[in-house]
Amino acid sequence: MPQVQATVVPIEEAGPSYPTTVELRDPSDGSVAVRYKRRGGARRRLIAPPSVYKGKQRRSIIRALISLLLTYQVLCRPSRTAVKETLSSLNRELDKNEIHDDYDLRFTNSSMENQTLQAGLPLELMCEVTGVPTPVVYWTLNGKRISGSYDNTIYEKLHNIGKVTIQNGVTTSKLYIPCVDKSHAGKYKCVGTNGHSRIEQSAKVTIAGDEKCLEAVKEAPKIVQWTASRFENEENAVQLICRTNVPASIAWYDESRRLLNDLPNFEVFPNGDLMIKKTSWDDMGDYTCVASNEHGEDRQTSFFYPTAKEAPVSK
């Protein structure tokens, strides 16, 4: 039975600010059990399916799950595969309850073409994927993952438990290598996934010459994956992606250049993504993610369109 245990701090102010022990278990029957222990007692909750929980019970489950999601990669590396499988199961269960349209996954643009590059020069590849649910992208070289993330928009899905969602979005991703040498030759793949299926495009990169790359020079961060556009029902939560190639300070701004990081209806996650907790028509527009460090900054813009809620159609 896959399980993981982690010490986390609740991300909401609703509970005490001392550490919480969270255990995520998959009973192998499609449900997910969460046991979280606080000073003074233990509690256990079972999600099967998630939409049956309301009010305080729902908030407790969401708080425990998001706390675990925000920390499992750092604290639980030995159990990472088991946790990833459990979270994938949870992701599919959430989508089954929230999405009433057909799943979709397609490439809309890319620069994946075979090429020969002189050693010592930079390499940049790009691909863009549209899908339902919102896709994420990762990159491989000769079959080994080298960049990108499996993390989808599960924080958004947890906030939207019990609601009908659209989860329609376009995600853009870049692979950037500042200096290539012979070790960077091979077959690169851009892999897009919506949590239910995946697609890929490949390009063969040949490196000419024997130029050696000097010791890595510290550079400004680059945003290597971001939401190009998103559509979601009004009043639902929406998660806009912004992920960098190196650790960076992340700031999000709206069209009026208002900083959103500390506003009540917004939350910036450690991976750089922005959550709009409850959307309205007034939230339509461009959102700019700025990633910075002491060497400089990079920025990308995401467009969000809140759609009018429609009556659910049975599958």
Image (tube, rainbow, N blue to C red):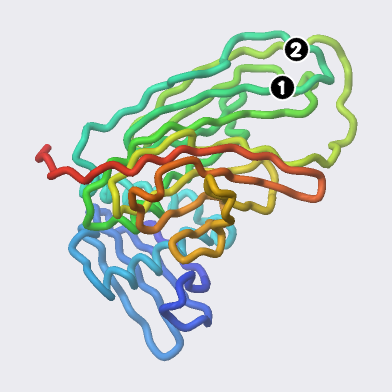
Residue situated in front as seen by the camera: 32 or 2: 32
- Return the residue at label 2: 117
Q: Left or right? Give the position of 206 relative to 64.
A: right
Q: Secondary structure at mark 2?
A: strand
| Residue 91 picture location, percent across and down | 33, 48
Rendered residue at 78%/19% (across/down): 182
Query: In which quadrant of the rendered image does the N terminus lie?
Result: bottom left
Name the residue rendered at 54%, 17% in the picture: 202
* Residue 167 left/right relative to 142: left
Q: Which residue is mark 1?
A: 123
- Disc 2 packing (10 Å; few <14; some 14–19; many ≥20): some
**Front-lying residue, 60 or 43:** 60
Q: Which of disc 1 and disc 2 is earlier in sequence?
A: 2
The residues bearing labels 2 and 1 have C-alpha atoms spaced at a distance of: 8 Å
Q: Would residue 220 appear left or right of 259 to someone viewing this image?
A: right
Residue 105 sits in which quadrant? top left
Secondary structure type for disc 1:
strand
Q: Which of these two is toward me, 194 or 89? A: 194
For the point 39% across and 57% down, the residue is 2
Q: Is residue 137 visible?
A: yes
State the image quarter where residue 175 is shown. Answer: top right
Q: Amino acid at mark 1?
A: Leu
> Residue 160 appears at what percent x and percent y?
30, 55
- Expressed as whole percent of the image width and height from the top left, the position of residue 305 reads 37, 40
Q: 83 or 239, which lies in front?
A: 239
Image quadrant occupied by the C terminus: top left
Task: Identify which amino acid the numbered label 2 is placed on.
Answer: Leu
For label 1, the crowd category at 10 Å Cα-Cα, with few meaning under 14, some 14 to 19 and many 20 or more, is: some
